[in-house]
Image: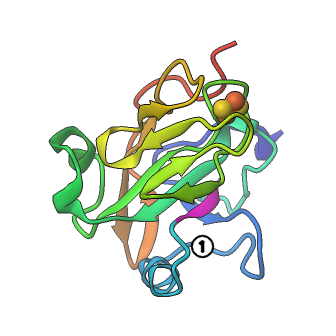
Amino acid sequence: IPSKEPVAVGDTLVFATGPKADQEITLDDLRAAQRERIPFIIAFPKSPENVVKKDLITNTIMVILADPNKMSPETRQHASPEGVLAYSAVCKHLGCTVSLWQNDTWLCPCHGGRYDIYNQARVVGGPVPAPVPQLPVKVEGGKVVVAGEFLGKPGADV
Ligand code: FES
């Protein structure tokens, strides 16, 4: 089933929900989100064959425009030069979507797991056993494009 294929290099990222669901996320969208104080966008990958791969839980991805100067060198290495950064959004604890933002940390609503997006999603709170893996991305033609495989195994550690 094409919509269950895992994210792959060359996929674009599309909005998972909202009025722009299934549309490709652009650098302009991320800048607009930042202006509106929407800290990040939840995304699914879309294949070059235009299939939105939304039926595989581990394809739930967060994408954020962040300050490259705040990123650790390892984090920055897999972000775009503009500061577009992506991670698996499936919590490593029990698999909830990490969907909140508080005090400059990314927060899981289920049991309060917290991740530091500037440091490869280092765990900074809650019962989470491991960081979520970073997804290398770049910007091409204004769109966010997957540039590498997850830097670890996505999905809950259960
Ligand atoms: Fe995220 Fe428990 S599932 S903290």
Look at 40% across and 30% down and name the residue there.
Answer: 151
- Residue 26 position, x and y percent, is 48, 77
Determine whether 8 is above or below 143 in the image: above
* Image side of residue 128 versus residue 149, left or right: right
- Residue 25 position, x and y percent, is 55, 73
Determine the main secondary structure of the stretch shown in magenta.
strand
Determine whether 68 is above or below 61 in the image: below
Q: Does the magenta stretch include residue 42?
A: yes
Tell me which corner region of the image, top left, top right, bottom left or bottom right, holds residue 152: top left
- Residue 37 position, x and y percent, is 51, 79
Q: Is residue 64 magenta?
A: no
- Residue 87 position, x and y percent, is 49, 45
- The magenta segment: 40-45
Taking the view exactly as shown, the residue that stands out farthest to the top is 158
Judged from the image, the secondary structure of the residue bearing numbered disc 1 is loop
Tell me which corner region of the image, top left, top right, bottom left or bottom right, holds residue 19: bottom right
